[in-house]
Image (tube, coloured by chain):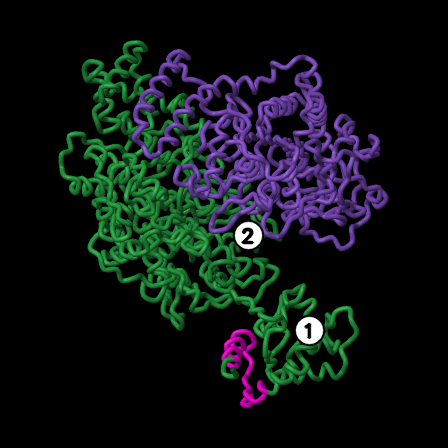
Amino acid sequence: MIAMNSPSHFSRRHLLQRVGGGFGMLAAAVSLERDGFAANSLNPFAPKKPMHLGKAKSIIWIFTNGGPSQVDTWDYKPELKKRDGKVLDGFDPKTGFFPGSVGPLMASPFEFKQHGQSGTWASELFPKTAMHVDKMCFIHSCWTESNNHSPALFMMNTGATRMGYPCVGSWVNYGLGSESDSLPSFVVMSDPLNRGLPKGSAANWGAGFLPSIYQGTWLKPTGAPIDNLVMPASLTPRRQRAQLDLLAKLNRGALAQSPIESELNARIESFELAYRMQTAAPEAFDVKSEPEHIEKLYGLNEKHCGHFAAQCLNARRMVERGVRFIQIYSGGMENQQSWDGHNDIAGNHRGFANESDQPVAALISDLEQRGLLDQTLIIWGGEFGRLPISQKAAKPGRDHNPHAFTVWMCGGGVKGGYHHGESDELGFKAVVDKVSVHDLHATILAAAGLDHERLTFKFQGLDQKLTGVENPKVVKQVFT
Amino acid sequence: MYRLLITLLISSSLLAMEAVLPDDHAQRMARGLKTFDQHISAILKQNCLGCHGGEKVKSDLDLATREDLLRGGSHGPVVVPFDAKSSSLIDQINHVKEPHMPDGKPKLSEQVIAKLTAWINDGAPYAEPLIAGKKPKRDASVVTNEDRQWWAFQPLQKVMAKSIEELLLRNAKGMTFSPSADRATLVRRMSLDLTGLPPSDMSDTSDLSDLLDKLLSSPAYGERWARHWLDVARFAESTGFEQDYDRPYAFHYRDFVIKALNADMPYDQFVKWQLAGDEYEPSNPLALAATGFLGAGVFPSQITANEVERTRYDAMDDMLSTTSSAMLGLTVGCARCHDHKFDPFPTRDYYQMLSTFTTTTRMNVDVHPDGKITSAITTMDKKKSTPVVPGAMRLMICGEGYDPIVMHTQGGPFFDKTFILKRGNPDLKDGEATQGFLQVLSRPGDGKRWQWQPPKDAKTTGRRRSLSNWITDVDHGAGALLARVIVNRLWQHHFGTGIVPTSNDFGKTGTPPSQPELLDWLAGQLIANGWQLKPLHRMIMLSQAYQQSTRLDPAKEASDPANALFMRRVPQRLEGEAIRDSMLAVSGSLDETMYGAGTRDENSKRRSIYFNIKRSLLIGSMVAFDLPEPLVSQGSRPTTTVAPQALILMNSPQARTWAGGLAKRIVSTGDIKQQITRAYRLCFNRPPNADELARGSDFLQQVGDLTDYCQVLLGLNEFIYVN
């Protein structure tokens, strides 16, 4: 592992400290110049060797924002149907968000059927995605520490309920570097239908105490997705080229006598990269250039799912271009804007499943057909689950449940048709092989070839980790 | 030997169990030792050690040494020396208390139990550890004299020296300073260092000392250096978390910092006001605004019933952690869940300090034209909030005695008491915490020295002012470290690296000072100057060390790669704020209006310190140039080189507009050569050389557009670095 634990590890002085004076390491750092974001030995994005075996080169996290209900999606509970309408004895009304709206146990309004050779039970919400169950790996025993959106979102994204820690994408970005020289290596897409951002917004893709370059780049849902990518109207390509040529010549003239020659060189190079990005990035985001059968596969022109289809397709295009970490938020902020079905769980979940089922299924098929599924980990999951009891509302809903929820993964070397852990017979609490958020993070890092114990960054005197201090465990069973 | 044992015994028992020492303790201990040798050692090894100190240490209970035994495990002490009746171990082996011991094995024989009972009644002495050579675990809850030996906890050394040069040369291993930079370079360096703006007066011929006076008395000095402090203070103007609501009256704190620096407020007062301005000068709006330091952290806007208490501890932790990082360079926050693993900060110290803030909250107050100060009620429901009275000024402060700002919460703004928590968990309370300070930075027995009793009619408890007394007390409290930390920050911003490179960590995980004597000497100078910073800036900037050229010196670089000896100088990249402000300045469009509410409009022409800082909507161009997220105290920024920075300089509408402004300033200067010369003087404080002149002329003749040319200059390395 290239030591990377100095907050200002980009000056020559610190580089020398980092490599501990070892010539081999310095050489290693220099030999990584080829493909980086800033094409230089000081390049913080230079691709780094994975620390241990893992197949995923890219990760796509479909973040089902608001907290989908496990018992209405992927965690089938026949017992819940039997006890429909009965009071859940001993239930602590503070478990969910609304202590005053506690209803009785409520059967899922959806039909469940078995799919695939694995016989995986899935609700009727995902007819297309369910066709892939034999490639999907389900963790039914996830639990988290908060019953409130933003702390739970922070927990799921950064491993801490408090604001201000680096998110999973930033850690992966920091640990693996970038394979792309024309796109940011960590991008986030939020709801394009004007239903808001996940609670806590940018803090969910922030770099915390890691250098800010590792934060997620939020693609604006409307207009130019990245700032300053378009040349000012008052310039022409020829004139901008002339500017950059002059800039390079003048900068080079001042190089020889400087003790920070390599840093200044990197800056010269960064202008050339920026120049290339201007054409490469818009090309990458141009989903309209895809052939018709792909458009159809994703449902790009379908009213009910076209917006999400464009994001999933975009994700595939970015994976092809070496982007490391892509997060797509399904749903906007809260309540009826997202999977947060406090009111009318049936209508709420039907709507968001309908938006995403076809595009997600298409993403799996498409990556598979291109031979990319093995090296791309898809994660589907939100910040918590929902209660098996109903929440009293105009139409019954379900309140937040931190004690159990299901996350599934697909591709990237995970076992297909595999179910890990169990919630209790009502889907209320995780009981068998419980998986904490830190365990989940350790597992995601492992899938990307990163050892969560060794992926550290020195801050406030400590070697900080994504997965905290309480000895989380990689869920090894999910890997083939 | 007996004396030694008894000393150990007294110190441990006083701390842990408050046992009464019987009159015949010496005789009893002697008898107990014999029992230990003959029976107890074997009994413990055979029945207990397997789970408690041998292969395993269940429930954290380790019997291998006497000290470990007496400290007890995660359920508390199990043995009270000289008092078997009060020792839970005896109850457990008698099977009258759960869990019965030895666990899962038959009950010990009556004989064995009797021997153990007698041994405890004799003081439970050990002749030797049960495992040969094993040393007792260090008790991190006790601060020892050895702990106090760490350099940062020592009083300031008395260093005899006349100058910075003298001290640096003493350690220079035969090296000498690099030659001085030329005057034009120095003028630009000094100007950017002190004001964050390029030199404006090109005809300036005054000597450097006069120039320094001018720069230090410029209001731009406060605007530049306040930004450094705002990083340390994790300053922002929104709540963070789910809604990231604006704090529309938080900017007064930023203005306080600028004003205080410009007025050269003594640093100890600067610190005191930030912790307790409302307790020093309750009717002075500036002193009140200073407390914005404590309130600048994040706070959730939606808090469920079972999160109320944890959230409150988080908020107090933010105040304490920021105070200790910013002012003392210490990571005290680590002791929230366990005794600090590296530094001598016991969890108890943490909670005792934390209790300083028990009743401290964010509040909005209105200062009326007649000077009267009233509470403004601020809730999430505008209708229930106090409207802003015309003519009154509303400030966000952080203290006691006015109405706390209320978020969407299922609980109150604070709890009346702060408790010591096990593992940081509010459900595991371990007694109330009364105010205290770090033992390692307090002379023993001085507990009451700093306590301040507020007047009878005061709105506050006096606890924050007491903290500020301790933190600024050079002789008995933390004042020496306070001085070291701030002089190091000054040095860091003047040289690129601090004497202590880890400017926010002076503890054992940080890097010790490269020049300890210089650090202490500077700290002593600061205190001798009445804690004023401006004389220190002068002293540093007039030194040969500061004025060295940045010309490459491979020999020096090879022998001192980290530049710990400061015998050479390395160019520094400007921060995003200074780059943007410099562009505005040379374009002739800088709006010098000071203070007041900020904006998030990148087209603003005011200095960048007046950007409104909303945590979820940070200013893109600032973030691209490494503005840290304002979440925790940040002592230094990374310096990265990435393509988005180039995109800003190439394509942002602002870069283009300001290049146009510069073009306008030079267009009427004369012919192309004169235009180029004027542009170089404005941007780099020097004339162009022949090559630069030729290339510029070629470009202007071929492309023709003066704005295009000026934009190139604004993107040059020379523009965004300080030589």
* Chain letter, green: B
Quadrant the N terminus of chain A occupies: top right
Query: Which residue occupies the foreground of this view, B567 or B591?
Result: B567
Q: Is residue B1 above or below residue B490?
A: below
Q: Secondary structure at mark 1?
A: helix
Location of residue B670 by image quarter:
top left
Residue B323 visible from this viewpoint? no
Three-letter code for the amino acid on which mark 2 is drawn: Thr
Q: Chain of mark 1?
A: B
Left or right relative to A430: residue B451: left
Location of residue B493 by image quarter:
top left
* Chain letter, purple: A
Answer few, some or many: residues within 10 Å of disc 1's Cα (few below 14, many 20 plus, some between 14 and 19). Answer: some
Where's residue A217, x and y in %?
52, 30
Q: Which residue is mark 2?
A: B311
Where's residue A53, x and y in %?
65, 37
Q: Which residues are magenta?
A: B5-30
Q: Give the number of the mark in front: 2 or 1.
A: 1
> For the point 46% across and 47% down, which residue is it?
B632
| Prevalent SS, magenta region | helix
Q: CA distance from mark 2 to mark 1?
A: 46 Å
Residue B428 visible from this viewpoint? yes
Where's residue B702, x and y in %?
31, 9
Left or right relative to A380: residue B515: left
Left or right relative to B498: residue B333: right
Q: Is residue A120 above or below residue A431?
A: above
Query: Which residue occupies the foreground of this view, B377 or B707?
Result: B707
Does the magenta-highlighted stretch encompass residue A340?
A: no
Q: Which residue is mark 1?
A: B45
Query: Which residue occupies the foreground of this view, B387 or A42?
Result: A42
